[in-house]
Image: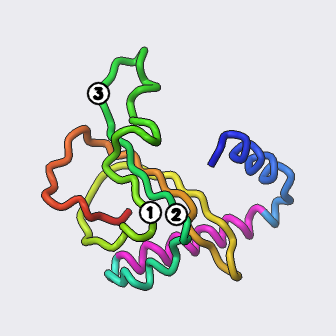
Amino acid sequence: MTEAKTAACASDWARMSLSDRALLQYEVEQFLYEEAALLDARRYRDWLALIADDVHYWMPIRRTVTISDLDREFTKPGDMAFFDDDRELLESEVDSWVGRRTDVLRREGGGFRIVKRHLFLDQTLIRATNMSTLF
């Protein structure tokens, strides 16, 4: 998502009524709970139904940097990454990881689809032998 589009989404949110915000928040929370339940149950084919055909599933590499270089802590899109996948590459096994993620959802057909997911791990070294992991 471009910065301009992100700003547009933020301004749309600011113009929404409190009840519309609450409804949207509830719908997004329910979508994310459903996604987590599918992953917890290892229902990966059902989980793939939540993924947009044009998804960008990305997790940058975290680097140890000084405070003055915090803008370089995570690699940028197009640089090296643990994941830089499309829908075709998302079939995988589950492992445990610690970090955070940011998602962009789009309404489609009465529900949501994941359009973009960026993952930021807390660790700087990956010790897993299998990098096929879904977040």
Residue occupying image coordinates x 39% and y 53%:
84
Q: Amino acid at mark 1?
A: Asp
Residue occupying image coordinates x 32% and y 81%:
42
x then y, percent, for residue 130: 18, 61
Q: Secondary structure at mark 2?
A: strand
- Magenta part of the protein: which range? 21-39
x then y, percent, for residue 5: 72, 47
Q: Secondary structure at mark 1?
A: loop
85 above or below 61?
A: below
Q: Earlier in the sequence, mark 2 or mark 3?
A: 2
Say whether marks 1 and 2 touch (CB < 8 Å).
yes
Report if residue 36 lies within the magenta region: yes
x then y, percent, for residue 89: 36, 67
Say whether marks 2 and 3 touch (CB < 8 Å).
no
Residue occupying image coordinates x 65% and y 78%:
111
Query: Would residue 94 be found to the left or right of residue 30 on screen?
Result: left
Name the image quarter holding residue 81.
Answer: top left
Query: Would residue 120 be found to the left or right of residue 109 on screen?
Result: left
Q: Amino acid at mark 3?
A: Thr
x then y, percent, for residue 126: 20, 47
- Residue to which mark 3 is pinned: 64
| Distance from Cα at disc 1 to Cα at disc 2 | 6 Å
- Residue to which mark 2 is pinned: 55
Q: Residues within 10 Å of mark 2 (few under 14, many from 20)?
A: some
